[in-house]
Every structure is written in structure tokens, then in C-alpha cells.
Image: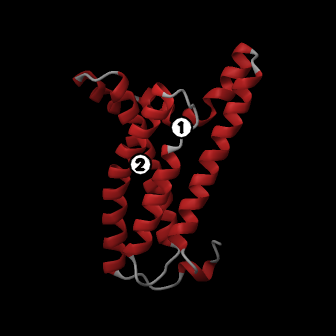
Amino acid sequence: MFHIGNWKMPIYKDDVRNVVLYGLIYSILAGILAGSLDFLFGKLWRIPISFGLIVLSVIIGTQVRRGYRSYHILYPVLTIVFMILGLIVSDFVYIFYHFPTISTFKCFIQWSFYWYVIEGSIDYILLCFRNFRIEYLIMGIAEVLVYGFSFCFCYRLAKGRN
């Protein structure tokens, strides 16, 4: 996967520009969509698993794949960075739906918001140890599996057949 020979291949400026442009635009747009889906499924319909993350991985992976003509190992690695950016936007939109005020924008400058983004996937597992409930453990394991699947799926989509 990360062989030295893959990193020595030539990188074309047009491909890098397209990949970065598509990745940034679609990570923001797909993050908004994923945050809306998470709010819709989680808050209104009480489905706690993040299905918006799977949509985020499909959109970012396919758009980054369309952004280059000549494969380089850097492009699938960049999709992971764009997935993290989309996850930040998704969590911000989710929080903004809960608290629709201007002061919600202040959470971008607080470290606790970024810690919430990182810790969000294992939150149910931590709740299991705090409250001693097995359903929190099951939901936490399912959420970690969804996160792992979506990141691997996005990497595979961006990689293509190479």
C-alpha cells in the first residue's frame, strides 16, 4: 500500500490542483449533508449510528477519483485529510442544528470542539464504562466499525484500480 516506489512516481500540478480543489469543496458540501443526515437520523428518528459519514466517504472518494488523470499515492492519502475536514464540518453542522445561534461559531476556536470530533466515535464506549450499560458498548463498537469502514472505503474509492 505505502511502498517507496509509489511515492517516487511523478506528480502533475494540474492533478494536485484538481484533487485539492475537489477535496476541499466536496468535503465542505458533503460535511453539511452528513451533519444534516446525522441530525435527521439521530435526533428526530433516534438512530444513533452515523450514516452521514458513509455518504461523506462516498462523495469525497468519488470526487477525488475524478480529480486526477495519473495516479499517485498522495491522492488517496489526501482523501483521509479531506474526510477529517468533512467530519469537522459535519459535527459543526450537527451542533449548529442543536443550538442555532451566532455563538455556535465560537466553537471553532475552542479545543473542546475538536476533542469532541476525535472522541465522538468512542463516546458510547466511554458511556458504557461510566454507566455500566451493555447497549452503550454495542453502539460504541458499531460506531467505531462505521468510522473504520467509511475511512477505508473512501481510501479505496480514491485509489481506484491502481
Q: Which residue in the structure is indicated by mark 1?
A: 118
Which quadrant is the C terminus positioned in? Answer: bottom right
Going by the image, does 161 lie left or right of 36? right
> Which label lies toward us, 1 or 2?
2
Q: What residue do we see at 44% from left, 84% from top?
A: 70
Location of residue 159 (image quadrant) = bottom right
Residue type at mark 2 is: Gly
Going by the image, does 45 lie left or right of 27? right
Residue type at mark 1 is: Ile
Instruction: Give above or below for 150 relative to 44.
Output: below
Badge 2 marks a residue whose secondary structure is helix
Residue 40 or 122: which is nearer the viewer?
A: 40
x and y, in percent, of residue 9 in the image:
51, 85
Instruction: Give above or below for 15 relative to 44.
Output: below
Q: What residue do we see at 67% from left, 33% from top?
A: 140
Badge 1 marks a residue whose secondary structure is helix
x and y, in percent, of residue 110 in the image:
37, 28
How far separated are the C-alphas under marks 1 and 2? 13 Å
Location of residue 66 (image quadrant) = bottom left
x and y, in percent, of residue 100 in the image:
28, 23
Looking at the rendered structure, which numbered label has been put on residue 86?
2
Q: What residue do we see at 41% from left, 48% from top?
A: 86
Q: Are marks 1 and 2 in contact (CB under 8 Å)?
A: no
Instruction: Give above or below for 7 relative to 106.
Output: below
